[in-house]
Structures are given as structure tokens and as C-alpha cells.
């Protein structure tokens, strides 16, 4: 994918207040979520159910938000048992910020 298109997609994904809030939380999961029974908060990511409970939106709405972040390459998902866990793609986020810095500063 062309880097300009990817960068635009990433910023569009983060332009939504709820998605930006979720990204902040999952970048520092131990500060925002209790330990999980299945899956480590850092290694496996945060269970979608935990995100649903914290952000007070329906599960389909949160899943839709997470799909936008995943399509932009900002998060990855992993299924454990019946749940989906999301964790940030730190290298994509770092690359996004670096590209922006080069272009604008």
C-alpha cells in the first residue's frame, strides 16, 4: 500500500475520540485494566470484553472500532477461547509518528 494512503488511513482511524481513547488504554494496559484470566494484558492484548466494559459501548460497536484500527495497521488481534484480544502495533504507530515528523517539522 502506498505510504501516503496508509498514513491517511491511520490518522482517520485515530480521528475518532473513542478509538483514540481505546488506543491510549491498550498502549498502557496495566494502567487501565485488571489482570485477565485468559491472556496476558501485554503479551496477548486486552480482551474485547474488557474494552466494552470500560468504554460503555456495545460489543458490536467496539468490534467495529477495533476493525478500523486493525485495518489501519494500528492493532493486531488474537483469538483465545471465545474471546478476541487486541494489542497495539507499536512499530506502526512509531513509523506513523516518524513519517509525520519528517513531513511537518
Image (cartoon, rainbow, N blue to C red):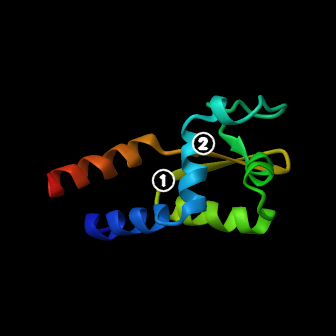
Q: Which mark is residue 44?
A: none
Q: Is residue 102 left or right of residue 40?
A: left
Residue at 41% over, 68% down: 9
**Along the viewing direction, whichever of 21 and 86 lies nearer the viewer:** 21
Q: Is residue 67 left or right of residue 73?
A: right
Q: Secondary structure at mark 2?
A: helix
N-terminal label among 1 and 2: 2
Circle 1 residue: 74
How many numbered tags mark residues here? 2
Looking at the figure, which quarter contains the N terminus? bottom left
Give the answer, above or below, for where 43 lies relative to 54: above
Residue at 62% over, 31% down: 42
Give the answer, above or below, for where 44 lies relative to 19: above
In x, y percent, where is residue 58? 80, 65
Nearer the observer: mark 1 or 2; the answer is: 2
In x, y percent, where is residue 46? 69, 41
Callout 1 touching callout 2 (CB < 8 Å): no
Which class describes the residues within 10 Å of circle 2: few (<14), some (14-19), or many (20+)? Answer: many
Q: Secondary structure at mark 1?
A: loop
Circle 2 residue: 26
Amino acid at each position: 500500500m502506498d505510504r501516503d494512503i496508509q498514513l491517511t488511513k491511520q490518522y482517520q482511524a485515530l480521528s475518532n475520540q473513542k478509538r483514540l481513547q481505546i488506543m491510549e488504554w491498550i498502549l498502557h494496559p496495566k494502567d487501565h485494566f485488571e489482570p485477565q484470566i485468559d491472556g496476558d494484558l501485554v503479551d496477548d492484548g486486552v480482551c474485547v470484553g474488557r474494552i466494552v466494559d470500560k468504554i460503555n459501548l456495545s460489543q458490536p460497536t467496539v468490534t467495529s472500532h477495533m476493525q478500523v484500527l486493525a485495518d489501519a495497521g494500528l492493532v493486531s488481534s488474537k483469538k483465545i477461547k471465545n474471546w478476541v484480544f487486541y494489542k497495539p502495533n507499536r512499530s506502526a504507530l512509531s513509523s506513523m509518528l516518524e513519517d509525520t515528523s519528517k513531513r511537518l517539522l
